[in-house]
Image: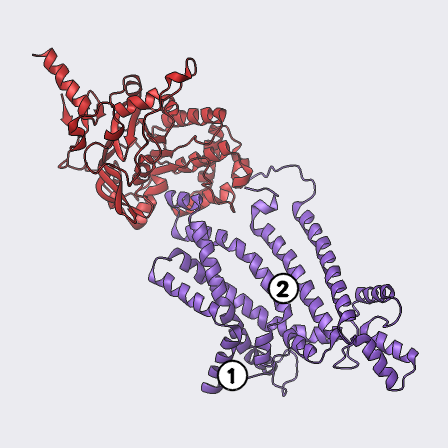
Amino acid sequence: MTLIAVRGAPRVNPVVRRLAGHVVRGLVMIWVVTTISFVIIRNIPGNPVLGQYETLIEKGMSPDEAQRATAALYGFLPTGSLWEQYTGYMKALLHLDLGQSLSTPGTEVVTLLGSAAKWTVLPVLGGTLLSFVLGVTLGVYAGIKRSGKLGDLLSISGSLLHGVPQYVIGLLVLAIFTTLWPILPAGGPVDVEFVPGFNAGYLASLIQHATLPVLTYALASYGGWVLAMKSSVATVLGDDFILAAELRGLSRGVLFRYIARNAILPLFTILALSLGMLFGGAIFIERIFNYPGLGLLLVNSIGARDYALMGGTFLVTTVAIIIANIAADLLYAVIDPRVRTGGTA
Amino acid sequence: MITISHRAGETPRPDSHSASGLIAGPGATTAPGVRVRDLTVVYKTPLGELPALGGVSLTIDPGTITGIVGESGSGKSTLALSLLNAVQPPGRIAGGSVEIDGLGNVVDLHGDRLRQARGRHLGYVFQAAQNSLNPLKTVGKQLLDLGRSHGVEDRRALVRDAKSLLERMGLDGARVLDSHQHELSGGMRQRVGIMLALVLNAQLVILDEPTTALDMITQATILRIIREVHKERGLTTLMVTHDIGVAAEVTDRLAVMYGGRVVEHGPTMEVLGAPSHPYTQGLIRAIPRLSGDIEQARALPGRPPTLGTLPASGCVFQERCPLRMDICATVEPPPVIEDGRTVACHAVERSRHTAQREEHP
């Protein structure tokens, strides 16, 4: 079958145009967030930057040395006009220099973020994708059979799980699988006796430790997906083209795909956003399972009043959400032809 | 001669075999006739089940284009959907039968047999304003979905048929098959809808307000296409419309519906030229003439009944009827056939008797 594509004259590819717009807006947002975090750090009571500088002088450093040390710590000079400090901070940021952590002296914030990020991505990404696939599939059934017993059951399970706070689910899961029925490790990312790398023991330990956080995350977000998908399906079922497809005698399988694919569209935005949010870390889950991800890092940095690290964590979250937004938009263009051609129907 | 069309004991035609037989090319199959008998469709409401169709009987002769006209809520679309046994919840067919040649009583069809009958034997065309295509897939892919659903083995032939149908209707077949719904105009979408209804060689085609929401020029084109394709393929066509002008232009026979009943049915020119039922008369008086005084067009007094405001007994039209008699409040007028025309009205009935008595005293 040869189908000749005759479309409007190609000016600028609409996808490229959308992407360019998003990148520009994303950069502006990153600039705004970093500026705000600069201003806040300069204005918190006690001024941690000046405080650090003065502490160092008290310890017997010369003002020059203290200034250099503080500069290394924060990425900008604590003295000089606010404008000079600001430009210095921005310059360092362009080189991805977020300064040094206060609570772990001598360690770059970037290094800390990097090592925490990998522990966050694994369980939260796994949990999100698992709950998305599960929730969306069951949500379609709940939507189609919403007047039946199965539909009721699925909706009730969704509402229940959606209503229970993440940390309660986490504690329940912890109690069940480590105390009542102790089959899985209670905390930490991996057993220390294994050598990191691609060996069976290390990977098995990794998966064992990740199971409970992933399960908790999946259970906590499953309900939301079921309910969102169910209502989206209900909307699509009322669309004319579904009745038309039925009256053309399309098979159940085809009809199911028509419904599912149209209903899933609005959920992709939520998925992309929650993937962005995961870089903020699942604070409760990481605390409960002592998983050294970004959430735990953020909690610890707040506890230690480590402003450089806090700023870094916020920055990572911001950037991740912005990137996720762009990704969602591009994904939309791939799955929705109306976006691809820039039309509105 | 006067006959009553309620023939409860009528024997069904012996052609109620399975729908899953092999389909022959156009011309090899013959246009099916349709016999709707005492069809009752009810809608579940908080007030209980209310009738949208109250015992409709209608015979559609093979090879005709039959129009169904009536105001909104008169039950036209419900009747059209009943022919595919596709009344949507909260509605349901509560009684009666719809016999279609080659399919049997579609009210008794269920599951896969019903699904196979739809699309393959019964083509349904939606109103153009409705979006009857999946917005995410090209027309070509939806055509293949249709083929797959009905076990069509030769996909190339299917695509070829679809292209030739589209080209027959003045479209660039290849281009349309490669387009999404939003890339097509209303008139193009409507032709795609007609193509999808015909491409599997359905011999009974039901069009629900096929030209509503289209501009006049496109409307004229679509109507011409409907007429031509109907003739070429030897179809039986049923067209639901609220536009009497459209019905006059296209249909051979016309059924007028009011309050879930067919109140008048006969050859289009006769029904429009010499309407018998007071409702049809009022309907035609209400059409403004292109030339002449707009004041001459007189709207029917009152408003059409809704499901809840139908009279509990007697004639559905009694409240707005200028010829109302005592009997109209108590007895529902039965449809009476005379000279190929069906009318359900006590007043018409009485005047006929009077006329006959005067002729043969």
Q: Visible in this render: residue A149?
A: yes
Chain letter of mark 2 equals A
**Could you tell me which secondary element the residue under label 1 belongs to?**
loop
Q: Amino acid at mark 2?
A: Gly
**Where residue B297 sits: x, y (%)?**
37, 19
Q: Please determine if labels 1 and 2 lie on a single subunit.
A: yes
**Where residue B296 sits: x, y (%)?**
37, 16
| Nearer mark to the viewer, of 1 and 2 | 2
The image quarter containing residue A38 is bottom right
From the viewer's perspective, is A224 left or right of A148? right
**Residue reaching furthest to the bottom:** A193
Q: Nearer the viewer, residue A250 or A75?
A: A75
From the viewer's perspective, is B304 left or right of B340? right
The red one among the chains is B
The tint of chain A in the picture is purple
Rendered view: B274 above or below A41 = above
Seen at 53% across and 34% down, the residue is: B185
- Disc on the earlier residue, 1 or 2: 1
**Could you tell me which secondary element the residue under label 2 belongs to?**
helix
Q: Amino acid at mark 1?
A: Leu
Rendered view: A317 above or below B291 = below
Report the Cα–Cα distance between label 1 and label 2.
29 Å
**Where residue A131 sits: x, y (%)?**
51, 67
Count of labels in the image: 2
What residue is disc 2 on? Answer: A276
The image quarter containing residue B240 is top left
What residue is disc 1 on? Answer: A184
Q: Nearer the viewer, residue B203 or A322?
A: A322
Q: Badge 1, how many Cα within 10 Å: few under 14, some, many 20+? A: some
